Image (cartoon, rainbow, N blue to C red):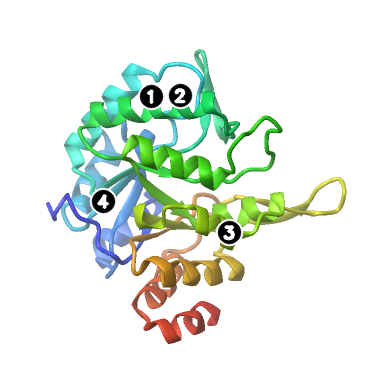
Amino acid sequence: MVNGTHIPSRAGVGLKPQHYEQVLDGRPDIGFFEVHAENYMGNGGPPHRYLTQIRSRYPLSLHGVGLSIGADRPLDPEHLRRLARLIERYEPGLFSEHLAWSTHGRVFYNDLLPVPYTQETLQCVLDHIDQVQEALGRVMLLENPSTYLIFQGSSFSEAQFLAEVVRRSGCQLLLDVNNLHVACTNHSWDPHRYLQELPLDRVRQIHLAGHAQDSDEHGRALLIDSHDRPVAQAVWELYATVIDRIGPTPTLIEWDAQLPAWSQLFSEAKRAEDILGAPPQRRHRYAAAG
């Protein structure tokens, strides 16, 4: 197994079953792969057989979508135990989850739902992160959300809330640049001010993905974090700005629906890697070269 404690500052892609064979046969020159933890919580079968082979050749990061960090109720202890077993089995270099909630009682929603940025929510999120980091024996990454509404009762901006969570919990950040662009467009926020309020020195991974464009009932732009198309030009440009600020950082291309051919997914990763490796004076030129 390759080094389980390090993800290189290169570009990686989300691993999907449709691409298992091509990855194993072609051995592409790529920085790392990432999988959704909940897809591998069974004990065996083809998913584990393939992932074990791929993990022996590439670094792996693990991305959770079901812990419900932002819920106002306790974490599911069985889900947390299964996650701990999975991490012990594959030794991923990074583990991340979302600032969101997706459960209510025994009901699981297939969405990552927003939270109000209040003191009460902050304490709940801190408690949950402490519980996760204790159970896993490692520092986790928390991802900024893509949102379509904001709560009038919020007492923090989103970036301020994330900064406070990081400061008080000791967790690190997964900066999803597409989510940042989506949220800032939907709520008329300034993305550069958002970045100024974030503790960028705590960013350990970046996500890039595609989004769909729509409009609300007033005809204003409404972006949907769809993960079903190439990364938008505006996101590439914002990504280059982020790399200017923090330097080369492990970057994942997410593409979860309407999957393209492996060659197109690999091409998106290559574009990210060109930006990562470019000298600062050429970085934005690579971002513009679609």
Image mark for residue 193 = 3
Q: Are marks 1 and 2 in contact (CB under 8 Å)?
A: yes
C-alpha separation, residue under disc 3 versus residue under disc 4: 32 Å
Q: Are marks 3 and 2 in contact (CB under 8 Å)?
A: no
Place of residue 76 in the rendered image (x, y in percent of width and height, measured from the top left): 38, 18
Return the residue at label 1: 127
Establish if 240 lies above or below 67: below
Place of residue 13 in the rendered image (x, y in percent of width and height, measured from the top left): 38, 58
Q: How many marks?
A: 4
**Residue at (44%, 86%) from the top-left corner?**
282
Establish if 178 lies above or below 9: above
Q: Nearer the viewer, mark 3 or mark 2?
A: 3
Question: As rendered, which of 62 and 170 lies closer to the eye?
Answer: 170
Question: As rendered, which of 12 and 53 lies closer to the eye?
Answer: 12
Return the residue at label 4: 60
**Mark earlier in primary sequence (3, 2):** 2
**Residue at (27%, 32%) from the top-left corner?**
133
Q: Dot 1: within a 10 Å radius of its alpha carbon, few (fewer than 14), some, or many (20 or more) residues?
A: some
Report whether residue 58 is seen.
Answer: yes
Identity, as a three-letter code, of the amino acid under mark 3: Arg
**Mark earlier in primary sequence (2, 4):** 4
Image mark for residue 94 = none
Q: Dot 3: within a 10 Å radius of its alpha carbon, few (fewer than 14), some, or many (20 or more) residues?
A: few
What element does badge 4 sit on? strand
**Outermost residue to the right:** 218
What element does badge 3 sit on? helix
Q: Dot 2: within a 10 Å radius of its alpha carbon, few (fewer than 14), some, or many (20 or more) residues?
A: some
Image mark for residue 124 = 2
Q: Nearer the viewer, mark 2 or mark 4?
A: 2
